[in-house]
Image (cartoon, rainbow, N blue to C red):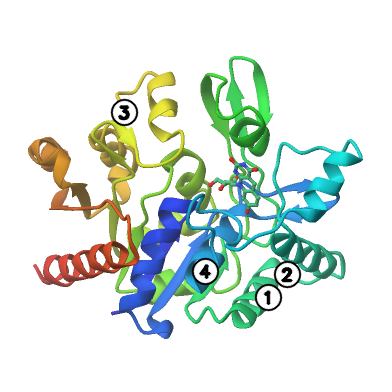
Amino acid sequence: MKIVALAGGVGGARLADGLSQVLDPESLTVVVNTGDDFEHYGLYISPDLDTVCYTLAGLANPATGWGRADESWNAFEGLGALGGETWFRLGDRDLATHLERTRRMRAGDRLTQITLDFCRAWGVRPTVLPMSDKPAPTVVLTEEGELPFQDYFVRQRCRPHVMGFRLQEGLRPAPGLLEAIGSADAVVLCPSNPWVSIDPILAVAGVREALAKTYVVAVTPIIGGQAVKGPAAKMYAEMGILPSAVSVARHYQSLLDSFVLDSTDSGLENEIEMIGLKVFVTNTIMKSSNDRRELAEGVLRWIEGDRKQ
Ligand code: FO1
């Protein structure tokens, strides 16, 4: 089965990793959010692309989910000693990625090509695509004004109250993205933040139209009213929406054929079916590599069975 996974940060990367353990490399394409990208120290930084690629390569820091494992912080400490900005941590191994990506983007290379080359260098075999080669900065609209994404997420630790988001609408999709969705048997919306990880991908020109022509299943990023990681539940609450798997199902509703609900929330199954979605209830918490593979296997089996009906 050919699968396209839409993913953002840590949660999405983990399911993408599970899918890469189960599917042949040529049967999996991971499309990654670039709305978190920003320039820092003159470097073009693409956190979700790096989180997905590092995770698929087995290079990710297991504690944080972002950045590299076995990292050292010599350059970063040197920056601090010089009075440089230290709110966004850049490890020595991670810096190589940002330096080389920035050098190649300044030379005119496309983010898509850079990502494919980095994946080859890191031994990542599935295809990983940015959602677009064009900059797509997500702006967070808060009660304290408009904030660039990393300012909100890292510098301010998601404290400001969110009122909404401004996404880049109608961006040109990365080469091959729409074709990958068009030839997929199914698309999996990974358990990433619906607002700032998945919605930016859905806003890329042609993506919603392409999804309408194929089987789409979303894996809940909210369990028991809480996000597994990150501010998704807080964002829902601040925008007056009850943080729950039902709210996520409604968030994507028109795009979905079915929804993967965590066993903790099995009581919500009927409510989600009432809005017209079929529901697969399973354990969606991924603490280990084995959990990632098991969730991926379960979702693929679900898709196989549900598509046939
Ligand atoms: N997140 C933090 O909370 N603090 C950091 O210092 C930080 C540094 C960082 C460096 C590289 C990278 O790829 C990601 C990094 N992140 C950090 C995570 C990043 O802000 C988020 O993972 C995404 O933007 C949202 O998923």
Foreground residue among 184 and 75: 75
Q: Is mark 3 within 8 Å of ligand 1?
A: no
Between tags 1 and 3, which lies in front?
A: 3
Location of residue 242 by image quarter? top left
Q: Residues within 10 Å of mark 1 (few under 14, many from 20)?
A: some
Return the residue at label 1. 113
Tell me which residue sits at (51%, 49%) in the image: 64
The mark that comes first in sequence, 2 or 3, is 2
Q: Which mark is residue 212?
A: none
Q: Residue under label 2, please give it.
A: 110
Q: Which of the two marks, 4 or 3, is nearer to us in this view?
A: 3
Give x and y (percent) for residue 121: 64, 81
Label 4 to label 3: alpha-carbon separation: 31 Å
Give me the C-alpha separation between circle 2 and circle 4. 14 Å
Give the image location of residue 296, x and y in percent: 27, 66
Q: How far is the residue under mark 1 from the one under mark 3? A: 38 Å
